[in-house]
Image: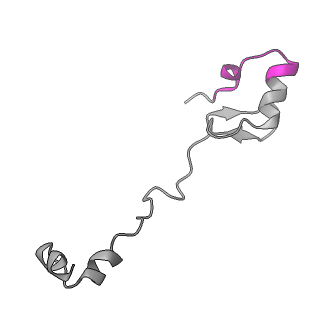
Amino acid sequence: MDEMARAAGYGSAAEMVAGSGRSERKDKGIKAPPMYKHPTEDKTWTGKGRTPDWMKEYEKKRNKKREDLLIDK
């Protein structure tokens, strides 16, 4: 195994194995900008993940579409 590691440019097999862990995402912690805004309250949603309750209520009670709440850019 050490011979294969040296052939691949590593000093030892342990050095080769140590670098094989998962790499951390570079975009971790970057927030997506909101796409939807509540019409009267200061609530927003990015459009990703679970649909917030206020959006579900808006669609159901007022019989509106979520496109009506899109933030104009």
Pinpoint residue 38: horizontal percent, then vertical percent: 76, 33
The residue sitting at 63% across, 30% down in the picture is: 71
**Magenta segment range?**
59-70
71 sits to left or right of 1: right
**Residue 11 against residue 4 in the figure, above or below:** below
Dividing the image into 4 quarters, which one contains the C terminus? top right
The reply to whether the magenta stretch includes residue 15 is: no
Q: Residue at x 19, y 79 (%)?
A: 10
| Left or right, residue 45 beside residue 19 | right
Residue 54: which quarter of the image?
top right
Q: From the viewer's side, name the closer residue of 31 and 1.
A: 1
Looking at the image, which is closer to me, 43 or 29? 29
Q: Quadrant of the N terminus?
A: bottom left
The residue positioned 61% from the left and 34% from the top of the image is 35
Examine the image and state in which quarter residue 3 appears.
bottom left
Residue most toward the front? 1
Q: Does the magenta segment cover residue 68?
A: yes
Q: Residue at x 70, y 23 (%)?
A: 66
Task: Specify whether 32 is left or right of 42.
Answer: left
- Residue 7, given in percent of the width and then of the height, sits at 11, 75
As drawn, the residue found furthest toward the top would be 63
Quick check: 14 above or below 8?
below
